[in-house]
Image (tube, rainbow, N blue to C red):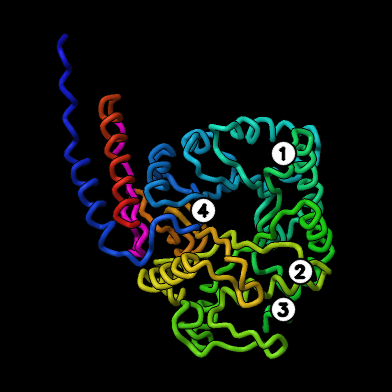
Amino acid sequence: MAVAEPSPLPHSCFLLVFTILLTASADETITAGVSIGVNYGQIADNLPSPSRVSWLVRSMQVSKVKLYDADQNVLNAFLDTGVEFVIGIGNENVSAMVDPATAQAWIKNHVQPYLSSTGTQITCITVGNEVFKGNDAALKDNLLPAIKSIYGALAVLGLQRQVNVTTAHSLDIMGSSYPPSAGTFRVDVVPYIAPLVDFLSMARSPFLINCYPYFAYKDDPNSVPLEYVLFQPNAGGTDTTTGLHYDNMLYAQVDSVYAAIQALGHTDVDVKISETGWPSKGDPDEAGATPQYARIYMGNLLRRIEMKQGTPLRPVVPIDVYVFALFNENLKPGPASERNYGLFNPDGTPVYDVGLRGYLPPIDKSDGTRTVVHLFAIIAIASITVMLS
């Protein structure tokens, strides 16, 4: 029997694999398997396909991904990979989910098919994002009923303990955050937040907060110490009420949220960071938006995650963080910084060197090329794991 000759390996594969094997050993400050999540936003017209992104995420040894929707193309691309997903229901769809039948249909279409033993691991659903930052009264009124409706749909299927239901907030919900022990929610959002926290306690779901020390620095760079927001050595400050010392703003922000939740009568709700990041580029009036500061912020944050640090108020509970974001997104509205939070450019090259190495396969052009590309992607991932272990 004649033996078919193997397809020639594309030159780009040699270059990509060789490059990643070299760079994997060049910076050992971030080890493989650091327990971080990453936000995978898609407000762009130049991003790689979900199947290629799946390789990139796994080559980075990232085990958790957060979406802002329930894109089935993405979920299918991650089937049988072991990557955990937070999926989302956009603000525009929140009110519709108040109807139990609509919520049940959504769960059956977007969640249930991906929960088999070989499927994608969906661990959380966010209903809405930063709802209380806007002025949509109907959206605010419908948020908790929609969350309860989604929870009820999960309960019908016996999935309410397997999949959390919550929503993500911006720090705009805080009326006071300094010192951390004086943290309180805004008076106008307390009527919404108080029953939400009661629900989260009952459902054992986390309180998600989007924390950006960058915003505080950008708004007042002459008063906010740069070292304090970048996790660099600094004098920090002590909360005179608790005696707890803070050497960075992120931990102070998280503990202020814990204090605000405690003021509502709960100490049994975990706070998780659903977004944090630093832009690598901005408009002329956006102080600090540079690749250098982005690299320092993200690098120091990743080291603290690697150390399994908790905040001063919860020192034995490692911070749970989803960094923002996987890619620069060229269609996001707003100032230039909004389009430049990515760890990677759409072509898979790092925006700045933070020690996370990833592999983005070339675009598939034939079945034969796909086989070879996937084979060498596996080799690259395995090599990174060995060299960083």
Which mark, residue 261? 2
Q: Vertically, is 146 above or below 185? A: above
Q: Vertically, is 384 above or below 180? A: above
Q: Is residue 98 left or right of residue 133?
A: right
Residue position marked by numbered label 4 in the rendering? 39
Where disc 3 sits, the SS reads strand
Please identify, in this view, whether the residue under mark 2 or under mark 1 is nearer the observer: 1
Q: Residues within 10 Å of mark 3 (few under 14, many from 20)?
A: some
Picture coordinates of residue 159 (x, y %)? Answer: 72, 38
Q: Vertically, is 212 above or below 55? A: below
Magenta stretch: give its range: 347-364
Q: Residues within 10 Å of mark 4 (few under 14, many from 20)?
A: many
Rounded to the nearest whole Å, what is the CA distance between mark 4 and mark 1? 24 Å
Please identify, in this view, whether the residue under mark 4 or under mark 2 is nearer the observer: 2
Where disc 2 sits, the SS reads helix
Rounded to the nearest whole Å, what is the CA distance between mark 4 and mark 2? 25 Å
Rounded to the nearest whole Å, what is the CA distance between mark 2 and mark 3? 12 Å
Type of residue at label 4? Answer: Asn
For the residues bearing labels 4 and 3, Cβ distance under 8 angstroms: no
Of callouts 4 and 3, the N-terminal one = 4
Type of residue at label 2? Answer: Ile
Of callouts 4 and 1, the N-terminal one = 4
Task: Please state, as top left, top right, bottom left or bottom right, where the C terminus lies in the image.
Answer: bottom left
Where disc 4 sits, the SS reads strand
Q: Name the residue rendered at 44%, 54% in the picture.
A: 326
Picture coordinates of residue 347 (x, y %)? Answer: 32, 48
Residue position marked by numbered label 3 in the rendering? 176
